[in-house]
Amino acid sequence: MVDILKTVLIISSITGALAYLLSLANKTIGNYGEKKMVINEEYDYVVDGGDTLLTALIDNEIFIPSACGGKGSCGYCKVKVNDGGGRFLPTEAGYVSKAEQEEGIRLSCQLKVKEDIQIEIDEELFNVKQYDYDINFITDVTPKIKHLRVQLPDDNEISFKPGQYIQILTPKYKGNREEVYRAYSIASAPKDNRNLELFIGYIPNGICTTYVHQHLTPNDKITIVGPYGDFFYQHSDREMVMVAIGTGMAPIMSILKYMRDEHIDRKVTFYFGARTREDLYMMEELETLTKELPRFRLITCLSRPTEACNWDGEKGRVTDLIEKYLDNGPECEAYLCGSPVMIDSVTPLLQEKGIPEEHIFYDKFE
Ligand code: FES
């Protein structure tokens, strides 16, 4: 009996000592003290060594795109590191090409700040801020798409370019154990700078879409970071060709409303594709815009109309519409928004029709 007690005591002592050593190691290993982060050779920050570069930036309220919330699975959080980045990591390889590696591009969510670091980011990212919005309304516009309008409290305003996007910070909820950011294009006009409108399509098991479709209520607040993106209205005199399917309508709406508010008179044709009649939405608003913008034409098509659709409009895909109607390619510029499949099939067609590559702008909804 005494022997057993002795053995238990020895094992407990060893376990206790190991636990103490482990906690000591946790506190010391990975603690690199304070480090200096210099951005664009101009702005200095003191950051906690051992944190990822993404965390160091967020701690200083610099919000670079990070759709996967730092898991290394979206490739959005690229930053140019001029000095102090350490060795390139295998976890970055899937998203950073060889050419980018040579330029010093790194995935900021993977790289840990272990020494003073010098980086470059787009100056525009200093305008990106985090806002807590009130919900104005949330309604179904199709069986799978919600129209969300949010409002900034007090006198806060957000400034963005028509066509840009924001990220929603999705909180933890039953079935989701982590906070993640997800990107959505803004559908409202920049002039309406206290509000944002978004179209959010439901994706089965999608973390943010499930949150918006099944958990968000009009009494909640929603945290939004933005604006982001280099897809936005270009000032020129070229005729405009717009192509979208599904929630890809959002940035097109923002651009059209901007043109209305700024009294911009350009010839615009918007080709919008949906499967069935119940997938068409915002049609009244678009009809109103055809009256407010004198040279705006809307052409919709259904790819899978049923008897119940009672549809005598265009049938087929947006590519069929472009084949049929686009006849002035060399004088046009194009704005495409939607799935990668749609954009990859429309882009070569537009080029065949004569639209120069440098005048084709797109926003792929991955
Ligand atoms: S935040 Fe997604 S890869 Fe870094």
Image: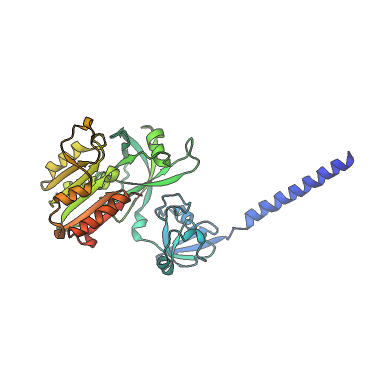
Q: Position of residue 171 (x, y in %)?
A: 45, 40
Question: Which of the image's four quarters has the N terminus?
Answer: top right
Number of numbered labels in the structure image = 0
Name the residue at the right extreme: 2
Instruction: Determine which quarter of the picture holds residue 245.
Output: top left
Q: Position of residue 206 (x, y in %)?
A: 41, 41
Name the residue at the left extreme: 294
Q: Residue at x 15, y 36 (%)?
A: 312
Q: Residue at x 88, y 43 (%)?
A: 3
Q: Is residue 213 above or below residue 18?
A: above
Q: Nearer the viewer, residue 301 or 154?
A: 301
Side of 261 relative to 226 (left or right): left
* Ligand 1's quadrant: bottom left
Q: Residue at x 53, y 56 (%)?
A: 51
Report if residue 254 is visible in the image: no
Side of 186 relative to 6 (left or right): left
Instruction: Determine which quarter of the picture holds residue 169.
Output: top left
Q: Nearer the viewer, residue 323 or 363?
A: 323
Report if residue 203 is visible in the image: yes
Q: Position of residue 358 (x, y in %)?
A: 23, 62
Name the residue at the top extreme: 308
Q: Position of residue 181 (x, y in %)?
A: 42, 47
